[in-house]
């Protein structure tokens, strides 16, 4: 890996104070459910290691994951961290194009030890003709970029599990990165971390990068999702959980009576289970970490979870609005 500034040096040049840097380390340790002393280890590691080289390749995607990762914060330290990793190639955002962009990617690969981020699913039907980057299939470009990578992070449901492009009848043969490795279509023997969601929570991406740099690959569940962020269902920490436990359920999206009753009884809006919420079977950090600078998450805003961090959520029998199981509200 070429000699580069450390995180701390780079952040300092951006006007981020040591105090803010330490606060970020503490919050990251907390979001990863690590003990307080881990914040000191994170601070000391990020102060001494070179910025990691990151190659980000997009397959079949809607750019929502890129938007979520890089545009959700204004002037936050998380944003600075993401801007200050050595993001040597990102085919949506980078200024160079054409052969200059490809040269930057090849230079980063040659150094080795990079982190490869993939968003979007990867089609393999018809020689990968349904996702082309610089005249080559996304599968080809990802294979080349995976050589020598220290870690692959599959961002979003599409890269992790195939997402919407893989929805039946999957005309392009779309698949997630790990599926391709298991089927032998992609050769890679290093670690893979899946960060599903449509899109994923930005702090989850930052937290995983920091954990990898400081302690290595985080503990993962059987679907290769980091347990620190995907170890609980969104139901477990939902703001409407008191209503669920008090048997207060909305029967329509404009159920004003239930809304008023629930506010007076439990101080929360009614549970959205009968409107199709998939929160009880969906593992993600939306209701604990929240979105847009801890402002909100789907059930907080009045819509049930559609299960976007789970495999095949798009093809779930009954669709988004069929209840997992229906509960009669008390009369
Ligand atoms: Fe659980 Fe969904 Fe009800 Fe929230 S709205 S308590 S996630 S069922
Ligand atoms: Fe997705 Fe459900 Fe979170 S729909 S954004 S996992 S609340």
Image (cartoon, grey):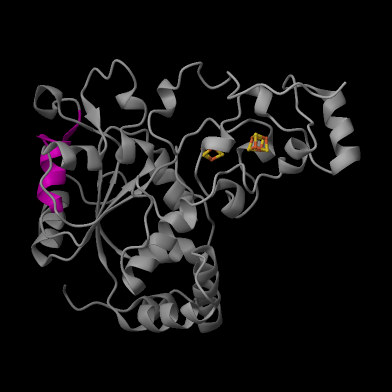
Q: Position of residue 266 (x, y in %)?
A: 85, 42
Q: Quadrant of the N terminus?
A: bottom left
Position of residue 132 relative to residue 239, above or below, is above
Position of residue 41 relative to residue 144, above or below, is below
Q: Quadrant of the C terminus?
A: top right
Q: Position of residue 330 (x, y in %)?
A: 84, 24
Image position of 108 (left or right of 53): left
Image position of 85 (left or right of 321): left
Image position of 283 (left or right of 94): right
Residue 84 shows in this picture: no
Q: Residue at x 44, y 80 (%)?
A: 43
The image quarter in which residue 233 lies: top right
Residue 108 shows in this picture: yes
- Name the residue nearer the viewer: 259 or 65: 259
Please say whether residue 132 is one of the residues in the magenta stretch: yes
The part of the chain drawn in magenta is 131-146
């Amino acid at each position: 890996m070429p000699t580069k500034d450390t995180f701390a040096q780079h952040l300092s040049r951006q006007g981020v104070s040591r105090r803010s840097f330490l606060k970020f380390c503490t919050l990251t340790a907390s979001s990863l459910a690590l003990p307080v002393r881990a914040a000191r280890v994170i601070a000391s590691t990020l102060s001494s290691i070179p910025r990691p080289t990151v190659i980000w390749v997009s397959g079949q995607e809607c750019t929502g994951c890129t938007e979520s990762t890089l545009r959700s914060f204004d002037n936050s330290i998380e944003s600075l961290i993401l801007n200050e990793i050595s993001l040597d190639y990102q085919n949506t955002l980078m200024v160079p194009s054409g052969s200059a962009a490809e040269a930057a990617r090849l230079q980063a690969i040659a150094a080795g030890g990079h982190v490869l981020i993939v968003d979007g699913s990867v089609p393999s039907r018809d020689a990968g003709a349904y996702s082309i980057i610089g005249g080559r299939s996304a599968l080809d470009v990802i294979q080349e970029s995976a050589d020598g990578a220290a870690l692959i992070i599959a961002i979003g449901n599409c890269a992790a599990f195939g997402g919407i492009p893989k929805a039946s009848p999957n005309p392009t043969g779309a698949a997630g990165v790990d599926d391709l490795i298991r089927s032998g279509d992609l050769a890679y023997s290093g670690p893979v971390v899946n960060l599903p969601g449509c899109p994923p929570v930005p702090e989850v991406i930052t937290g995983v990068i920091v954990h990898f740099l400081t302690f290595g690959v985080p503990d993962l569940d059987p679907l290769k999702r980091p347990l620190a962020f995907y170890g609980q269902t969104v139901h477990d920490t939902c703001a409407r959980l008191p209503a669920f436990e008090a048997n207060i359920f909305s029967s329509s999206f404009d159920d004003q009576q239930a809304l008023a009753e629930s506010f007076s009884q439990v101080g929360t809006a009614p549970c959205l289970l009968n409107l199709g919420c998939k929160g009880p079977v969906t593992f993600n950090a939306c209701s604990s970490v929240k979105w847009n600078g801890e402002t909100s998450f789907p059930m907080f805003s009045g819509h049930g979870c559609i299960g976007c961090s789970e495999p095949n959520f798009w093809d779930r029998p009954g669709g988004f609005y069929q209840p997992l199981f229906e509960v009669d509200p008390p009369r």
